[in-house]
Amino acid sequence: MKNASCLAALVAALLMGTSPLAHAEKVCAAGGADISSALRAAYEHFDKDLSRTMRVGSQEGLKGFLARMENYQIKISVEGDRYIVSFTPSKYPGGTVKGGGAEYVVKKCSHQIERVRPYM
């Protein structure tokens, strides 16, 4: 996966204390799902979805911009027994972007994706 280094850098930053989530519960009582596993599940699913939808045909302009993972901001929050992982497009140099990205609800203990809500 060519974006693995981006994901590794993000996970390292989270675990080294550069985020409020660094002090969040790392390991679930049910046995081992941590925030990096939840992030990885959402990241890999979103990257695969981009490959299927945005990385076909012409890669020019906005479509080419949205096809690259490095053009998304990733935010993680905790809601009860779930992590919410959001992917939103970074500022597009060619104008305003409405929509794009998605929100993932990932179970803490199993790091299974429970729901995906595309941003339209």
Image (tube, grey):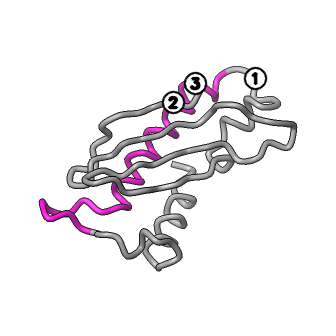
- Report how far apart the C-alphas of labels 1 and 2 lie in the structure: 22 Å
- Name the residue nearer the viewer: 6 or 100: 100
Numbered badge on residue 38: none
> What whole-number distance in Å separates the C-alpha atoms at marks 1 and 3?
12 Å
Q: Which residues are magenta?
A: 27-56
Q: Which residue is mark 1?
A: 58
Is residue 7 shown left or right of residue 23? right
Q: Residue at x 46, y 72 (%)?
A: 20
The residue under label 3 is 53
Name the residue that disc number 2 marks. Answer: 118
**Residue 27 % position (x, y):** 24, 67
Looking at the image, tell me whether mark 1 or mark 2 is earlier in sequence order. Answer: 1
- 93 relative to 35 in the view: left or right: right
- Location of residue 57 in the rendering, given as x and y in whole percent from the top left corner: 70, 20
* Residue type indicated by callout 3: Thr
Q: Earlier in the sequence, mark 1 or mark 3?
A: 3
| Residue at the extreme right of the image, as rendered | 94
